[in-house]
Image (cartoon, rainbow, N blue to C red):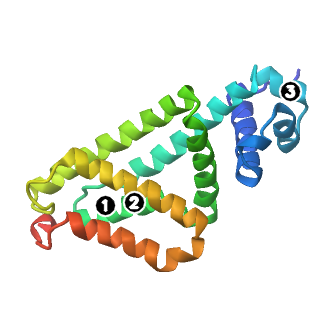
């Protein structure tokens, strides 16, 4: 009997090939033919799993969003024994391209962001993950204020938006100037955390 094919796994394999093409050559290099060559399969095989280039792109974007969201969810902002300032710094660092894997992901993310200005479907998908990130940050800021680790009387919505802007801005800066990560970029992370957090020890109790 022929071996059964895991359709979900095949779609993820194709999406991974598409993302490698974007990482190496940019969004403009993506086609059914170039993805098939990267995936080591025929154009017909690609078309069995995706009806169009756009469907491939949307699936690949969903894969990138899920990987990014999972990494953020795995960095708890408020855990016993971890101070809020340290946790906030860890969250910002989690999304920055500080190693080869995250740099590749950031290059792909940047390519999709650039297309989102003229692609409502990409913009909507990015807005979904942005909303999830904002919700996580708002809950963390609320808990930080309760335990005295956040400077008082601050607008939590504005702070969450600021943190996300810092994440996005530093991602672009590191992609353009990866050597800066050893100095000014990480100093910017520390400055952001220091501006928001108190020096008290209430949050450690």
Left/right of residue 137 with respect to residue 165 in the rendered view: left
Q: Residues within 10 Å of mark 2 (few under 14, many from 20)?
A: many
Name which residue lies at 64% across and 64% down.
Answer: 100
Q: Position of residue 99 (x, y in %)?
A: 59, 66
**Quadrant where the N terminus is found in the figure:** top right
Write the residue at 63% across / 48% down. 108
Q: What residue do we see at 14% from left, 64% from top?
A: 203
- Indicate which disc residue 116 carries: none
Instruction: Please report whichever mark, 2 or 3, sits nearer to the chain's N-terminal start.
Output: 3
Q: Which residue is mark 1?
A: 88
Seen from the viewer's position, the closer of residues 99 and 57 is: 57
Residue plotted at (54% across, 27% down): 120
Query: Compared to 68, does 128 lie above or below?
Result: above
- Near mark 3 (Cα within 10 A), the count class, few <14, some 14-19 or many ≥20, is some
* Left or right: 137, with 118 as reference point: left
Mark 3–mark 1 Cα distance, whole angstroms, equals: 44 Å
- Check disc 3 and report its element: helix, strand or loop: helix
> Which one is in front in this view, the residue at disc 2 or the one at disc 3?
2
Q: Residue furthest bottom?
A: 183
Q: Which residue is mark 3?
A: 45
Task: Determine the CA span between mark 2 and mark 3.
Answer: 40 Å
**Residues at badges 2 and 3 in contact (C-beta under 8 Å)?**
no
Taking 59 as reference, is 27 above or below it?
Answer: below
Estimate the spatial distance between the alpha carbons at disc 1 and disc 2, rounded to whole Å.
Answer: 6 Å
Marks 1 and 2: CB-CB under 8 Å?
A: yes
Which of the 4 image quadrants contains residue 75?
bottom left
Circle 1 sits in a helix, a strand or a loop, which is it?
A: helix
- Please tell me whether residue 60 is drawn above or below residue 158 in the rendered image: above
Mark closer to the observer (3, 1): 1
Mark seen at residue 92:
2
Work out whether residue 83 can be spotted: no
């Amino acid at each position: 009997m022929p071996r059964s094919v895991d359709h979900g796994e095949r779609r993820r394999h194709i999406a991974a090939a598409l993302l490698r093409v974007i990482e190496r050559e940019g969004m403009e290099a993506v086609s059914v033919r170039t993805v098939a060559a990267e995936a080591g399969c025929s154009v017909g095989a690609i078309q069995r799993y995706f009806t169009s280039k756009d469907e491939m792109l949307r699936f690949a974007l969903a894969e990138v969003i899920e990987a990014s969201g999972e990494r953020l969810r795995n960095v708890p902002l408020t855990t016993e024994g971890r101070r809020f300032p340290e946790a906030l710094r860890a969250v910002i660092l989690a999304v920055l391209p500080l190693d080869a894997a995250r740099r590749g992901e950031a290059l792909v993310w940047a390519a999709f962001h650039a297309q989102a200005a003229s692609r409502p479907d990409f913009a909507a998908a990015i807005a979904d993950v942005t909303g999830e990130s904002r919700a996580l940050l708002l809950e963390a800021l609320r808990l930080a204020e309760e335990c005295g680790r956040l400077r008082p009387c601050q607008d939590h919505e504005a702070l969450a938006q600021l943190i996300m802007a810092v994440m996005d801005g530093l991602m672009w800066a590191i992609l353009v100037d990866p050597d800066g990560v050893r100095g000014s970029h990480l100093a910017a992370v520390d400055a952001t955390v220091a501006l928001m957090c108190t020096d008290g020890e209430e949050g450690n109790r």
